[in-house]
Amino acid sequence: EYAIFPVVEYGTVVYYQGRLYSKGDPERGTKLFPSRTDIPYGSKYWVYNFDELNETKASTALVVESILNVLSLKWKLRELGRTDVVPVCVFKHSISKEQTVKLSRMRNLKEVCLLWDRDATGRAWDGARFLTSRFNVSVAEMPERPGERTLDANDDVEAAIEAFDNRKTYTPYNAVQH
């Protein structure tokens, strides 16, 4: 009932997430995560699409919160011929210290851009301060569409690319404004 997405770092499957692809039982939920007995470290330790970021030597990591966002953005960026940007997923509306350390090992990485769902943009600005000691940090804000539910990068990948292209550099002033 679940599509399983392996999380691979340095060629080794370290974690996974599953998404329900059939109607199934709504009581069970739409996501599947490994138990602590299966994988002792939770999602805050891993970065989905880490190996591609490492191998391509891209200068910008576009950090999103879901694997499906990464897959949509990878497809669109490839279609546009954009090789300087690699989307990665941190599974939440925040990036952990452990994930930041991993990104810090990327000598080629100059910028980290946070692109959370529209309902969590404020948290992106709050979390950006944490990253500024190592990277140029920016925040991309998904557009608000009146009458529509909150958009994420997977719902409207063109809007996500536009948000990325119009990203704002993090400064304490910008963070206060949001």
Image (cartoon, grey):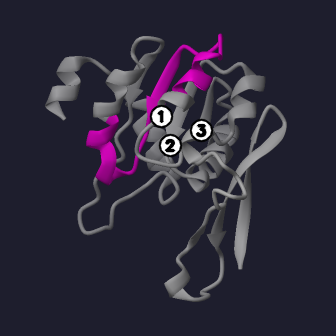
Rendering coords of residue 167 (x, y %): 38, 29
Give me the residue at 31% from left, 67% from top.
148
Q: Which residues are magenta?
A: 100-124
- State the CA–CA distance, disc 1 to disc 2: 13 Å
Image quarter of residue 9: top right
SS of the residue at dot 2? strand
Decide which of 146, 85 is in the foreground and name it.
Answer: 85
Residue lying furthest right in this view?
A: 11
Cβ–Cβ under 8 Å for marks 1 and 2: no
Rendering coords of residue 20 (x, y %): 63, 75
Q: Look at the picture and state if 142 lies above or below 17.
A: above
SS of the residue at dot 3? helix
Cβ–Cβ under 8 Å for marks 3 and 1: yes
SS of the residue at dot 1? loop
Count how many numbered circles sit on residues in the image. 3
Task: Check if residue 102 falls in the magenta segment.
Answer: yes
Q: Earlier in the sequence, mark 3 or mark 1?
A: 3
What residue does disc 3 label? Answer: 45
Q: Does residue 29 appear anywhere in the picture? A: yes
Give me the residue at 54% from left, 52% from top.
66
What residue does disc 2 label? Answer: 64
Q: Indicate the amino acid at tag 1.
A: Ser
Q: Indicate the amino acid at tag 2.
A: Val
Residue lying furthest left in this view?
A: 177
Q: Earlier in the sequence, mark 1 or mark 2?
A: 2
Q: Does residue 169 appear anywhere in the picture? A: no
- For marks 1 and 2, give the one nearer the viewer: 1
